[in-house]
Image (tube, rainbow, N blue to C red):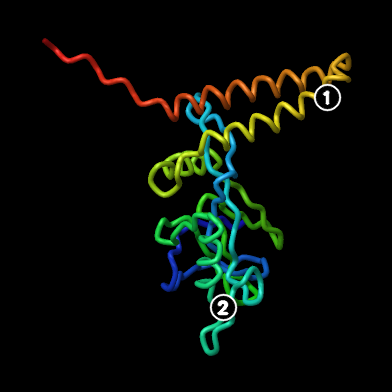
Amino acid sequence: MTSFQATSWTGGHKVQQASKLNVHPNAPFYLMHYPFEWEVQKIEGEYQWVPKFSSLYEIAGVNGVQDIPKQGADSSYARMKYKEKGFTILDLDLGYVSRYETVYGGHYYALIWETPKQIADRVYWNIDEDAYNKWRLSLIGVHVQKPDIDVKHSKIATIERRIDRKSKLQHIPEIKKEIESLYELKKNMNDAYTKMTTPAKKGKQNA
């Protein structure tokens, strides 16, 4: 078994590794957030809204990424177009990408919270979801804007439609449990949003 230590990669510098991953190389990527992409996660005992991300890989010809002669793939134009559509593109300087040398040459890029473990010729990935969720939470109000009230309404409406579709079968125990879970999710989303958007009360001043 070979263990690997995730090291932040922010572009450019070379990372030396004693061991190489038995996976095919992929391309570096940027995390992107669309204003309607949110979910609720339990963080340190409390439900919180956190942004969801998609990835923009630097692969020429895909999603508007250009091929620059003698330089290779360049996502500058693609990132600009996604920003015009309302996406937030996270800078690599935030340190969310790690990379590993592979036995096939090149590098494999992953989130810094994903750690590979190689057993013989197989590679298994583990993710520190608690750390990842805390990082996502830390971005709100700094790198990612808080969700608009209409975003919350759209998410709640989706849950309500799911409840309505299942309500005719609520006599089935399994379906009833699913409906109860959806009601609980709806409450957690509302409570978490209220907490996030309500200014903290100032402590009483001494007379």
The image quadrant of residue 182 is top right
**Residue 185 location in percent, x, y?**
64, 25
Q: Is residue 121 above or below residue 62?
A: above
Q: Amino acid at mark 2?
A: Ala
- In the rendered image, the residue lying farthest to the left is 207
Q: Which residue is mark 2?
A: 73
Q: Residue 55's spot in the image, x, y percent?
A: 59, 58
Q: Residues within 10 Å of mark 1 (few under 14, many from 20)?
A: some
CB atoms of marks 1 and 2 within 8 Å: no
Q: Image check: 73 left or right of 158? A: left
Question: Real-space Cα distance between discs 1 and 2?
Answer: 47 Å
As drawn, the residue found furthest toward the top would be 207
Give me the residue at 55% from left, 66% from top: 81
Residue type, mark 1 in image: Lys
Residue 190: image x %, image y %? 56, 24
Hey, which quadrant is residue 201 in on the image?
Answer: top left
Q: Residue at x 49, y 54 (%)?
A: 88
Residue plotted at (50% across, 72% down): 76
Return the residue at label 1: 166
Whether 157 is drawn above or below 17: the answer is above
